Amino acid sequence: MGSSLGASLAQLVAMRGRVPVLGLVLMDGGLPAAPGSGEGLAASVLPFLGEARYRSLRGRPEAAYASLGPYYADLASLAEADRAFLARRVVERVESEVQLRSYFSLLRSLVLEASFSSRAYAAFMAKTGLPILILWGEDDRILAPASARLLGRHAKAAVQLVLPGAGHLPQQERPQATAGAILEFLGS
């Protein structure tokens, strides 16, 4: 199971076959992605530019928090405790060089993987006999729901579910619906 970049990592683990995988849950991520998906992240892939944008949020907690907006259908609708947690967590992340290096290393590795292995991912999705749940936020502005449909076209037996009122992180905006969908999938 993976969310966002983690969904592509979950696919990669399953594709490589080095550990037993009984099924996949892909939340708002996975490969191949629909054309135009992730356009907002494109500049982040360029060396130095992504890091400069990331570092520009340091010492600016309001700007760091505002940078989370595109990841949610409605950031302001989250519970106050969740918003307070996210405000603290995003500041911790942007202040950390380890987080910066980890994020950009993973992001760039997956972009390269997608560039050179997109067909391999599509073939894997088409031929795998694994049960697959493709769970997507209807209002995802990071990877549009068109990517969910594309994944579903490759993995014809996959269960696809689009959650209304959720953006790129449905597990935070619609936790009960997300957990319910996963539990139902696991029970099938």
Image (spheres, rainbow, N blue to C red):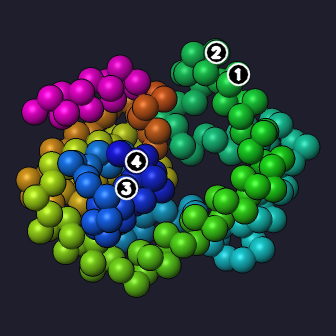
Name the amino acid, label 4.
Gly
- Residue marked by disc 1: 84
- Residue marked by disc 2: 80
Name the amino acid, label 1.
Ala
Which comes sooner in the sequence, label 3 or label 2? 3
Q: Could you tell me what secondary structure mostly forms the magenta stretch?
A: helix
> Which residue occupies 14% across, 63% down?
128
> Which residue occupies 58% across, 72% down?
108
156 relative to 43, above or below:
above
Q: Magenta stretch?
A: 174-188
Mark 2 touches mark 1? (CB < 8 Å): yes
Q: Residues within 10 Å of mark 1 (few under 14, many from 20)?
A: few
Q: Is residue 34 left or right of 171 when viewed as pictured?
A: left
- Residue marked by disc 4: 2
Name the amino acid, label 3.
Ala
Q: Secondary structure at mark 3?
A: helix
Distance between the alpha carbons at the discs numbered 1 and 4: 24 Å
Q: Secondary structure at mark 1?
A: helix
| Marks 1, 3: nearer the viewer | 3
| Marks 3, 2: nearer the viewer | 3
